Image: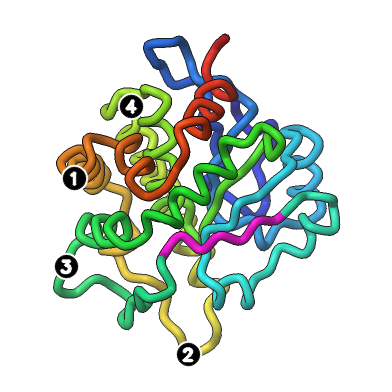
Amino acid sequence: MPEPATPTNYVNFRDLGGHATPSGPVRTGRVFRSDSLAYCDPTDIERLVTTHGVRTVVDLRREHEVDVAPMYGLRDAGVRIEHRSLIDPAVPPLQTTDLVDSTLADRYRSILASSGEQFVGVVGLIADERNQPVVFQCAAGKDRTGLVAAMVLQVLGVADADIVADYAKTATVIDLIVARIASRMPEGREAPGPRIMSAEAATMEAALAWLRDEHGGAEGYLLAHGMRPEQLTALRTALLPA
């Protein structure tokens, strides 16, 4: 679903609908992914609430990120904000502005290996039709958001090649994302570097390979970490054609 106008304060927003599955295309207008919506102005909020009907935002950011940039505007507009930090609190944040001794794919595998319960909680919220239309988002809308999108789409039966292509779409707006993050950094702090701020197909391919090698795919991963089968059924019922 295209945006009806250029949004002011978010640039990596898109519908998860429309992807092909063996059951038909994923339903549109139900689940969206985005970069941070914390800086939305009234026009942005009107677009999200009125045009897209957004009822719930699942915020994947860490506590300190939320403290710096809360979503009061969306909350005041009646949107339910669910903060569910995707990265296990026991995993320390990066201590540098860029990856030094590892790759972004390594980072993704680490998140997958340590945050199983967090993924289950987030996908469970997305699967619940009472929360839809729902947006899940982080800071740039590519790493934490990209992994959740991949998991949801794979459960629905979307081909890996299409999941990778959806992830790589972020590359078309990465310069805008970097510029916006840099403009919002506190004085004296540097914005993330280029090894972190990338969205290469090979990175998501590595994450999907890890899921298949370790758990047979996203469904096996989620079930192994506590998701109930009926929640996966609910996800498919909500997002696949009847």
Q: Nearer the viewer, mark 3 or mark 1?
A: 1
Which quadrant holds the N terminus?
top right
Residue 162: mark? 4
**Which dot, 3 or 2, sits closer to the camera?**
3
- Numbered label attached to residue 214: 1
Q: Which amino acid does label 4 sit on?
A: Asp
Mark 3 or mark 1, earlier in chain: 3
Q: Is residue 151 visible?
A: yes
Q: Which numbered disc flags the more N-terminal residue, 4 or 2?
A: 4
Q: Distance between the residues labelled 3 and 4?
A: 26 Å
Gap between marks 3 and 2 measured at Cα: 25 Å
CA neighbours of label 3 inside 10 A, class few (<14), some (14 to 19), many (20+): few
Q: What element carries label 2?
A: loop
Q: Which mark is residue 188?
A: 2
Q: Start and end of the magenta stretch?
A: 81-87
Name the image quarter holding the C terminus. Answer: top right
Give me the C-alpha separation between circle 2 and circle 1.
41 Å
> Where residue 98 is drawn, which disc sits there?
none
Magenta span includes 72: no
Q: What element carries label 1?
A: helix
Instruction: Give, as a three-letter code, the residue at label 2.
Output: Gly
Give the vertical position of 64 relative to 211 (above or below).
below
Q: Residue at x 51, y 63 (%)?
A: 85
Q: Position of residue 223 (x, y in %)?
A: 37, 41
